[in-house]
Amino acid sequence: MSTTGTPAPALVQSVWLVAQREVASKLRSKAFVISTLILLALALGGVIWGGLSAAHPSKTPVAVTSETASVVSGMADLAVTEAASPEAAIALVKAEKADAAIVPDPASPTHVKVVARDAVPQMLVAQLSVSPAVELLDTSTQDALLRYFVAIGFGVVFLMSASMFGSTIAQSVVEEKQTRVVEILISAIPVRALMAGKVIGNTILAMAQIVALVAIASIGLSVSGQSAVLSGLGGPMAWFAVFFLFGFILLAALFAGAAAMVSRQEDIGSTTMPLTMLILAPYILVILFNDNPVVLAVMSYVPFSAPVGMPLRLYLGSAQWWEPLVSLAILVATCVAAVLVGSKIYRNSLLRMGARVKLGEALKA
């Protein structure tokens, strides 16, 4: 029974009431709505820009003469300008209207030479060179640039969503402690319901944002004519959403517990910094090691980086069918443990005001 004499709400009802409150407060925030719309617009613009860039790659400006024009015939990635003489072709290079000039050179074995300003145009030289035929035994290997962009995409979405909503939970917890609102709340509902509602409410918002980003990416890839990329990304994006769900619950519970250890907004960083580093680590790792199968394999089984590492490996085709299931089982088990630890810290620290509560005390209390 509550202090007013009316029956206290059931646990599930209490959790849902807190979750609704969290969702409603964020949706009423103009800053949140505007930042979400900007994020979706940037995602759509980035996908369309990438598709247009791939469809219309930039061409290298090259100056030639009538004698050397045949050398570059059939090279689609060159913007060829035919000059009246070798001197005129070189003048175009000096005027920075061409990156290089291909002029006759009787002394050269190829009878032409490349004239550039201050650096050797390696790509052009490689195209003009005679190379042996190359046969790839594994034709499923992904394009390096595309792999890099996909890795960055998974890393950025995980980083931004987890850090945004994690910090929201932390600020909400400390604000309720600082204003003593939490004392009123826990007089009506259990402490575990308060924390569970916060985690669930922000998880709903985070997942809605992820689903919106996946939809925007799919639309952008379709509009920009990248159906092949979309077909390859469909499965990995679905797995990313599943992994993100449990990964976010894990982090949200720890953010709530860490924030409950302090009583001022200024002190939030001191307890949540380790969690922020855990969110930042997968982003940095996929930038540096997106082409390293060993690092990606380790990332796909570490709970904090699995939401980024496993979907990327599935996109690259380097993961066996059973690996995401094993990785997800590890993540779910870790998620349960994190919720238990976070809730204990939250429960034992929530009503302790003043100085920061030490982790050992929060776990033992």
Image (cartoon, helix red, strand yellow):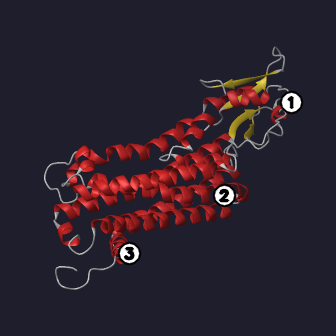
For label 1, count other residues whose C-alpha is less than 10 Å away and answer few (under 14), some (14-19) or many (20+): few
Kind of residue sitting beneath label 1: Ala
Is residue 240 visible in the rendered image? The answer is: yes
Circle 3 or circle 2, nearest the eye: 3
Give the residue pinned by disc 3: 12
Question: What is the distance, in whole Å, between disc 2 and disc 1 at their CAs?
Answer: 35 Å
The residue nearer to you, when weighing 305 against 39, is 305
**Residue that appears at 49% across and 64% down:** 207
Question: What is the distance, in whole Å, between disc 3 and disc 1 at their CAs?
Answer: 67 Å
> Which secondary structure, mark 3?
helix
For label 3, count other residues whose C-alpha is less than 10 Å away and answer few (under 14), some (14-19) or many (20+): few
Tell me which numbered mark, 2 or 1, is placed earlier along the sequence: 1
**Residue 316 tag number:** none
Q: Specify whether 193 is left or right of 97.
A: left
The residue nearer to you, when weighing 86 against 114, is 114
Residue 276 on image: x %, y %: 37, 46
User: Split into 4 quadrants, where in the image is the N terminus?
Assistant: bottom left
Kind of residue sitting beneath label 2: Gly
Q: Specify whether 213 is left or right of 197.
A: right
**Residue that appears at 59% across and 48% down:** 310
Asked where in the image residue 32 lies, by quadrant, the reply is bottom left
Kind of residue sitting beneath label 3: Val
Question: What is the distance, in whole Å, between disc 3 and disc 2 at their CAs?
Answer: 34 Å
